[in-house]
Image (cartoon, grey):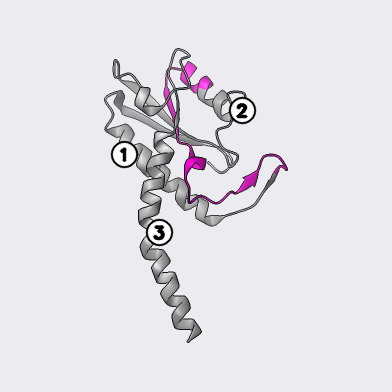
Amino acid sequence: MTRPLILLCALFVLILSPAARADDVATSYARAVVYLPGGRGPITPADIPATRKLPVVLLLHGCAGIGSREQDAHKWAAHIASAGYLVVMPDSLARSDRPASCDRKTRSAAMFPGVFELRRGEVRYAIEHIRGAPWFDGRTLALMGYSEG
């Protein structure tokens, strides 16, 4: 009796999970941090001007998140933007279904294999939106990440 109940619960979770993740992945992109060539930033994807077409770097932050402008993620984004690229950094921690995989305060981390699938979903979603954006040059789209990214 217990085994069928466990299987039924697992099936229920599998059926309902994709819908929640689809909504959450949109949140990770909507709350992305963007740096433009020329030092403007950070802004959001909705604030990117469509005045010119630019090469894009999709930057995945580490397990501690994007953080403040003094954090590594912002420093990398500003440096890449200074080389002429528009940088889009989805906010993975904005997702409500995301387990934590490190603690910045205690400097501890652990492996959570489910997080990697969430990050792949964020990449797919961001690429889809970048490719359709009027500001994307249609040729140059690079993926960069560090730590969990």
Q: Residue furthest right?
A: 106
Q: Residues within 10 Å of mark 2 (few under 14, many from 20)?
A: few
Q: Residue at x 29, y 33 (%)?
A: 131
Task: Tell me: 10 left or right of 70.
Answer: left
Q: Quadrant of residue 15?
A: bottom left
Instruction: Tell me where residue 24 appears, x and y as whole percent.
Output: 41, 46
Query: Identity of the amino acid at label 2?
Result: Gln
Q: Where residue 77 appears, x then y in whole percent?
A: 51, 25
Q: Amino acid at mark 3?
A: Ser
Residue at far top of view:
38
Q: Residue at x 33, y 18 (%)?
A: 49
* Residue that mark 2 sits on: 71
Q: In this picture, is 2 found above or below 137?
A: below
Mark 1: which amino acid?
Answer: Glu
Could you tell me how far apart the alpha carbons at marks 2 and 1 are, in whole angstroms?
27 Å
Q: Secondary structure at mark 1?
A: helix
Q: CA distance from mark 1 to mark 3?
A: 21 Å
What residue is at 31 percent from the left and 39 percent from the top?
Answer: 128
Say which element carries label 3. Answer: helix
Number of the front mark, 2 or 1: 2
In this picture, residue 39 sits left or right of residue 138? right
Which span of residues is magenta-colored? 78-107
Residue 89 part of the magenta-drawn span? yes
Identify the residue at image location x=51%, y=49%.
Answer: 98
Mark toward the start of the polypeptide (1 vs 3): 3
Q: Give the Cα separation between the discs numbered 2 and 3.
A: 32 Å
- Residue pointed to by mark 3: 17
Q: Position of residue 54 (x, y in %)?
A: 34, 21
**What residue does disc 1 label?**
128
How many neighbours does mark 3 have within 10 angstroms: few (below 14), some (14-19), or many (20 or more)? few
